[in-house]
Image (tube, rainbow, N blue to C red):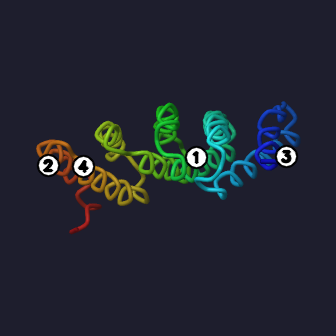
Amino acid sequence: EKLNEALGKIFYDINLSESVNKTNADHSILFEAINLIIQQGPSSNPELRNQAMDLLGRFISVKEPNIRYLGLETMSKLARLEGNENIKKHKKVVMISLKDADLSMRKRALDLLFVISDQSNAEEIVEELMPHLEDTDPNMKEEMVLKIAILAEKFANDLRWYVDIILRMISMAGDHVGNE
């Protein structure tokens, strides 16, 4: 209980300022507090998990690439614990991260989209990923193909849609599609 109070106080009291050094220290404290919530697992306070997800939503929207990267990575960890409902409101920002110039940022965004996919949103996410397949970095193409294939197979409601996705994927990235 005291730990939850301390974490709540951290989330409430820290105001991110314009001072770069203070802001770095504040972000560090906030990320550690969120990681502590993640380490607590399902027994962590649901209200604190929601606050953490909202903070991470702000972090993935900032211009500072290191904060965005850590935000995407930490959001992926929290999404595994929290589930998909609270994170869905951040999907648009995550999709924008797929266009980032930094390959590592695009990979974190792809990982997060894969984690948040479920029966209710997988077809939409796959359809949004498909245009990225043509122009994505060759170092990321195989991973994207694999994740699209898994999502399409796992969550397909319609056999025609599934076959269409697989055929489009082969035509767009045939060299990167494995035999499996």
Residue 18 position by quadrant? top right
Q: Secondary structure at mark 3?
A: helix
Residue to which mark 2 is pinned: 163
Residue to which mark 3 is pinned: 25
Reading the chain from its start, which is encountered first: label 3 or label 1? 3
The amino acid on which the numbered mark 1 sits, given as a three-letter code, is: Met
Q: Is residue 74 above or below residue 89?
A: below
- Mark 4 vs mark 3: in front: 3
- Mark 4 vs mark 1: in front: 1
Q: Secondary structure at mark 2?
A: helix
Q: Please tell me how crowded label 3 is: few (under 14), some (14-19), or many (20+) other residues with Cα within 10 Å.
A: few
Reading the chain from its start, which is encountered first: label 4 or label 3? 3
Residue appearing at x 58%, y 53% in the figure: 42
Confirm or deny contact between disc 1 and disc 2 (CB under 8 A): no
Q: Please tell me how crowded label 4 is: few (under 14), some (14-19), or many (20+) other residues with Cα within 10 Å.
A: some
**Disc on res. 7:** none
- Residue 40 in the image, given as x and y percentages of width and height: 66, 56
